[in-house]
Image: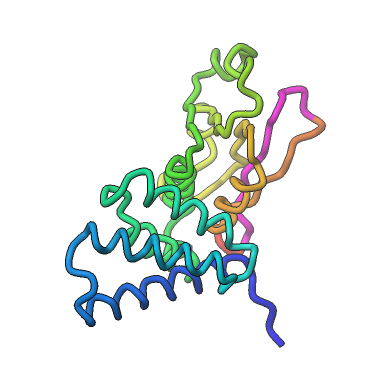
Amino acid sequence: MKIESLTEKTGHLAWCALIALHMARLDGAVRSVSQENIFLIRWLSTALKQHRFPREVAPDIHWLLKQGRRLGARSELHDKLDYLWRTCNGILLEQNDLFRLTYAIETAKQMDFSFHHLNDREWSGCRVLAGNTTADAIYLSRTSLDVSFNDDGQQIAPLFVRLTGNTARLEQILNRYGWCTENCLDNPIPFLYRLVVPAPLSQ
């Protein structure tokens, strides 16, 4: 019996939501963007209350509901679900490493992670993290970014970042895009992680 991965479970959630929306459009129940947003919020709320999907995907449902309720029609829930489906079904994994990293960061930003692109002085300084060690944030070294990829966007060296806040959630996002995180516990730089692409993806 096959055991589904978190990526497959999330992809199944997105697929079911998209199919439900498609059927509602065919039935004439959804005719506008605002109606689309209301339908998806209700569908996701019902799915959460009735435990239709594995508990591992509950954070995805909560995030989608938060976006839909806070932004209304501007939340573009359909696009986010389509984005999740494409990601979880390997379509984006066919892209190069740098492209997938960019997508991962953009996804994290949509999930309220802040992103900081630091020069050498900012990276080596301690003030950048002062008082913000619990905030959901990504700190990326420009120098590390420059030397970590070749002209084709393939990773050629480990990429060093500082991650704070809900790092487990961020690791899930990165994993979806074919990236692995390694905590550099032996390094004096606080909250330092190494981002690498598994060999089968980068070759």
The part of the chain drawn in magenta is 187-199
65 drawn magenta: no
Task: Locate the C terminus and report the quarter of the image it occupies.
Answer: bottom right
Q: Position of residue 127 (x, y in %)?
A: 61, 11
Residue 76, given in percent of the width and then of the height, sits at 30, 54
Q: Residue at x 30, y 59 (%)?
A: 37
Image-based side of 53 in relation to 81, left or right: right
Q: Pick out the residue farthest to the right.
A: 186
Residue 153 visible in the picture: no
* Relative image position of residue 134 (x, y in whole percent): 65, 28
Query: Which residue lies at the image location 51% right of the left edge and 59% below the top edge?
Result: 61
In the image shown, does 59 or 97 lie closer to the viewer? 59
Q: Residue at x 62, y 41 (%)?
A: 158
* Residue 8 pos. (x, y %): 56, 71
Residue 3, visible in the rendered structure:
yes
Q: Nearer the viewer, residue 110 or 31?
A: 31
Q: Residue furthest bottom?
A: 1
Which residue is painted at 55% across and 32% down in the image?
137
Residue 196 shown left or right of residue 95 in the figure = right
